[in-house]
Image (cartoon, rainbow, N blue to C red):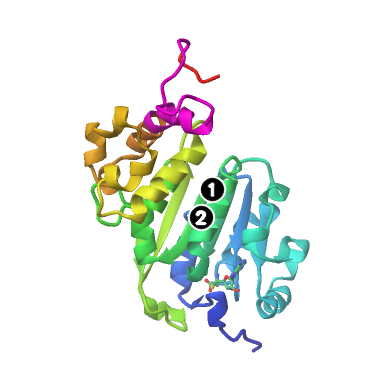
Amino acid sequence: MYDVRPKKALGQHFLIDQNIAQRIVEQLSPDVESVIEVGAGTGVLTQYLVQSVLDKFHVIEIDKESIAYLEKHFPMLGERLIEGDFLRTDLIQFGKQNMAVIGNFPYNISSQIFFQVLKYKEQVVEVVGMVQKEMAERMAAKEGSKTYGILSVLMQAWYDIEYLFTVHENVFNPPPKVKSAVIKMRRNAVTDLGCDEKLFVSIVKQAFNQRRKTMRNSLRPMLRPEIIEKEVFNKRPEQLSVQEFIDLTNLIGGQITTYRYPHCSPDGSRNASGSCD
Ligand code: SAH
C-alpha cells in the first residue's frame, strides 16, 4: 500500500489507534456549521469526519505526499481537500460563523495554530485538537498554577478550555518524545474584553516573559508614580486571573495617555478637563 513517509520538519506523527481517532472526532459539537481539519496526514481522523460532516467539511494539508495519499483514499473530498499552510489560510472562505477547527496538530507550530484561531475568534466557535500534553495543560491552566502562562490568559479570554484526555506516545508512528493530550475549546460569551486589546496582549506577554518577577518590576517602564505603589503590582503574573489582567490593562491604559500624547506636560499632569490637548 502507498504510504506517507513521516517528515519531522512538518511535525508528522501519524496516529495509529482507531479508537482514539474516533473518540477525538466524537468531541465535535453537532451545532457547528463548518469543520476544518488541520493536517490530515494519512487521514486517520478524516475517515470519520467524511462519514459525519462531509457536507460542511474542508481539509488543509501542507504536505504534497499526504495530499496525494488523501486524494487517492478520499476521492469524495474533491475540492474540499486543500493543499496549503493553515497559518496562511483565510478562514473566512469556509464560513462566517460557527466554525470548528479539528486536528492532531503538528506540535512544532501548535501555538501558532492557536494564534491563527484567535485571529478568527468571531468565526471559530470550537477547537478540538491534540497537542503535546504540556501544552494542553498550559492552555487549560487556571491562575495559581505553575503552568498558567501567556497562552492560558490570551486563549481563556475568549474560549472555555477543557483538558479531555491524555494519549500515550506509542499510538503514533513514529512515536513522539512526549505524551499528548486532547483539548476542547468553546467560544465563551465575551464579545468585547472591556479594555484595549492590544495593550492587554502586550501586558500579558511582558508580565510572563519574566514570570518570577513581580508585576511592578516587569511593567515598571509603563507605570507612572500615581499607580506604581498599588497592591496588585506586588503579585506575580501567575496569580492574576484573566479578569484581573483586564482590570490592570484599564488601570495602565488610563494613565498611559500621557505617553501617547507627548505634547502633554512632561510630569504627566493633565488639563482641567482631564485630557491632554
Ligand atoms: N492527522 C494526522 C496527521 C497528524 S501529523 C494523524 O493524526 O495521523 C500533523 C499533520 O499536519 C501532518 O500531516 C503535516 O503534514 C501537517 N501540517 C504541518 N504543518 C502544517 C501547516 N502549516 N498547515 C497544514 N498542515 C500542516
Does the residue at mark 1 contact the one at mark 2 (Cβ under 8 Å)? yes
The reply, left or right, for residue 86 in relation to residue 155 is right
Q: Pick out the residue farthest to the right.
A: 79
- Would you place residue 94 above or below residue 173 in this image? above
Residue visible at 50% across and 25% down in the picture: 264
Residue visible at 59% across and 63% down in the picture: 38
State yes or no: Cβ of the residue under disc 2 lies below 8 Å from any atom of ligand 1.
no
Image quadrant holding the C terminus, namely top right
Q: Quadrant of residue 58?
A: bottom right
- Would you place residue 116 above or below residue 156 in this image? below
Q: Secondary structure at mark 2?
A: helix
How many discs mark residues in the rendered view? 2
Residue at which label 1 appears: 118
Q: CA distance from mark 1 to mark 2?
A: 6 Å
The reply, left or right, for residue 241 in relation to residue 252 is left
Range of magenta residues? 251-273
Question: Is residue 139 visible in the rendered structure shown here?
Answer: yes
Q: Secondary structure at mark 1?
A: helix
Query: Residue 7: x and y, percent?
Result: 57, 82
Tell me the tag on residue 114. Answer: 2
Residue visible at 65% across and 77% down in the picture: 66
Badge 2 amino acid = Phe
Magenta stretch encompasses residue 117:
no
